[in-house]
Amino acid sequence: MGVYLVSVTAQDWSRAGEDGYGDVAAALNTELERRGLPPYESPRAGREAPGGFEEKASPPMDGFVALCRTHLADAELSALLDWSVLVPLALEETIVLPVGAAYSGEETVVTGAPRVLALTERLAGTVALPVEAIPAGGNLALSRWFLDGEAERTARTRPGPWAEDRDAAFYVALYLRAARHSIRYGCPMTYS
């Protein structure tokens, strides 16, 4: 149980109703068109990552939120923390859609992955996150690395601000990896 950050398959993105995101996809494309932007077309099944992306958001977020408040402007903080759907589009601002999705109530907040990537890269630099030491593939690999002791072992040989608050470092790595995954595979990300 718990909250997971997951990639959305092309099939689920186009499926309407409770089991899919078709209503969100249609509302997003309507809003993009209203803004004079091209529609978002989810990738074909052949481009999707094998197994997709899935990480459990389990550590406390207090340290991460404090880190964000210290190093990000209010609009940046909102772009990083307030979204319910992340898309691989370069959006200048967050888009609020009048349709609900999981964990979003009656509205869905959409943010562009390139913006989240830029913000998390900044935060990763601030805490000297050893990005290359953190596993990049496999579902729950990031969660296991932080929770099963590998992060602690790495902290002994790669100390730095990241090691002082590993819960905050987890969320920096989580959003960094999610944004990269979204951009690389052209897929939306959401909470499940």
Image (cartoon, rainbow, N blue to C red):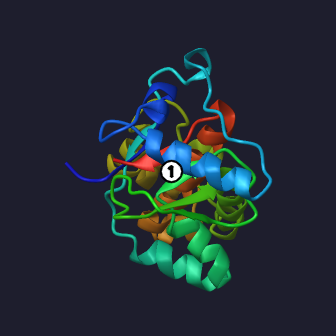
Closest to the observer: 20 or 139?
A: 20
Closest to the observer: 30 or 139?
A: 30
Closest to the observer: 153 or 54?
A: 54
Identify which residue is drawn at 38% across, 53% down.
101
Q: Which residue is mark 1?
A: 154
Coordinates of residue 106 in the picture (x, y in percent) = 37, 64
Identify which residue is drawn at 62% across, 27% down.
43
Identify which residue is drawn at 63% across, 83% down.
74
User: Can you name the residue that lies furthest to the right here?
Assistant: 36
Identify which residue is drawn at 34% across, 64% down.
105
Does residue 150 appear in the picture of this structure? no
Coordinates of residue 1 in the picture (x, y in percent) = 19, 48
Instruction: Specify the amino acid type for callout 1.
Output: Thr
Q: Which image quadrant is residue 175 in?
A: bottom right
184 w.r.t. 47: above or below: below
Does residue 71 appear in the picture of this structure? yes
- Is residue 129 toward the left or the right of residue 144 in the image? right
Coordinates of residue 11 in the picture (x, y in percent) = 46, 25
Q: Which image quadrant is residue 55 in?
A: top left
